[in-house]
Image (cartoon, rainbow, N blue to C red):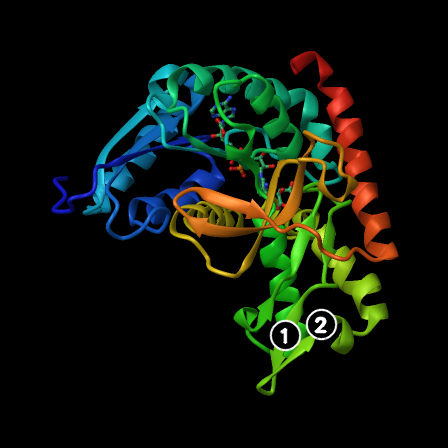
Amino acid sequence: AMSMSVKPAMNVAVTGAAGQIGYAALMRIANGELLGKDQPINLKLIEVPQGLKPLKGVMMEIQDGAFPLLNSVVGTADLSEGFGDADVCLLIGARPRGPGMERKDLMSANASIFKDQGKAINKSAKKTAKVLVVGNPANTNALVLSANAPNLDPKHIHAMTRLDQNRALGQMALKLGIGVSDIEKLCIWGNHSSTQYPDITHATAMIDGKKVRLSDVIDSKWYSETFLPTVQKRGAAIITARGASSAASAGNSAIDHVRDLFLGSGSAWQSIAVASDGSYGIPKGLVYSIPCLCPGDGKFTMVKDLKVDEYSKKMMSATAKELVEERDMVRHLL
Ligand code: NAD
Ligand code: LMR
């Protein structure tokens, strides 16, 4: 479709495009929710060869959406074609876990995917490309990708913990009987796994027109015995209930992440798993979720110099420890 917009089209590559998350996210991406309602896009949909047939059906449906912002769509199993000149890479394609598995049990099946894709992105994508890894174990996959894509700045290679942040916001808003946008500065530290630390020590809520500290209104027993495990184990609870891992909410959070990165989200904190610069005693280079500010245009800054209490320190180092162990498992790919 021809676009009347004056902006040049941006290239968005999506792996695993015929999977569940891909199916849930692609219509919204084509509709302008990823990069803005005035931003034309070229979609490059990447699948493994056996995924190309269902992908063809997804592409037919995208065509039937008649999206004004959609400049072109290609479907391919060829990584250099798929990642060619990419501005944004959404790396979703990977095996999901089933009941009873931890996400790191996917390591041997999935981590090597990100070595090949890192090399291909390194060769074919724009040097300024922004990469979001969704496929699990997301943090360590992003680490593998980064090690294999030296042309890209590691700070532009992210793993997704926005879903965890959204889950935490949803639970907290429900508990307090307020809206999610009444809550600020709630963030996720560390791994997208059950060791993640959903931190409320900096958070505030607007209650009856007054801004209060969450820690002053939230019962610490509810926090540690209900809230924390609910958020940490939400992925597994969805697998149990649905018989398949979260898809629409995962796609939604990936869109939130990239949209805020490009369009900005002002003073709001957004959790981004990205190579640590050593802040907060997190080992340098680990892909570790940290609160960030997103001013727009693909940029972000980490929130630094926060006061970290003893409990937080313990939680933050436990999830870092797990990421160090995961890194040791993929040494051969780095
Ligand atoms: P799915 O099995 O429905 O779809 C995955 C798709 O990826 C399939 O179509 C498959 O053919 C394709 N694929 C596999 N290997 C590929 C490769 N090397 N290149 C391109 N495509 C490839 O799975 P899903 O439910 O869409 O989940 C995808 C991944 O996202 C899983 O690893 C899942 O655990 C993860 N996930 C992460 C989060 C998060 O918050 N980070 C949330 C939900 C799911
Ligand atoms: C999620 O958090 O829903 C995903 O990471 C899928 C999973 O395995 O939990």
Report crowding for label 1: few under 14, some 14 to 19, many 20 or more residues within 10 A (C-alpha).
many
Report crowding for label 2: few under 14, some 14 to 19, many 20 or more residues within 10 A (C-alpha).
many
Find the residue positioned furthest to the bottom: 208
For this view, does 187 lie left or right of residue 74?
right
For this view, does 333 lie left or right of residue 225?
left
Residue at the image position 57 percent from the left and 24 percent from the top: 146
Depicted 56 relative to depicted 63: above or below: above
Q: What residue is pinned by disc 1?
A: 205
Residue type at mark 2: give it. Leu
Depicted 334 relative to depicted 243: above or below: above
Pick whichever, 227 or 202, lies toward us: 202
Residue 78 appears in the figure: no
Pick whichever, 171 or 322, lies toward us: 322
Which of marks 2 and 1 precedes in the sequence? 1
**Disc 2: residue Cβ within 8 A of ligand 2's nearest atom:** no
Residue 129 occupies quadrant: top left
Q: Position of residue 233 (x, y in %)?
A: 73, 50
Q: Tell whether label 2 touches label 1 (CB within 8 Å).
A: yes
Residue 111 appears in the figure: yes
Pick whichever, 185 or 43, lies toward us: 185
Residue type at mark 1: give it. Ala
Tally of numbered discs: 2
Residue at the image position 73 percent from the left and 29 percent from the top: 105
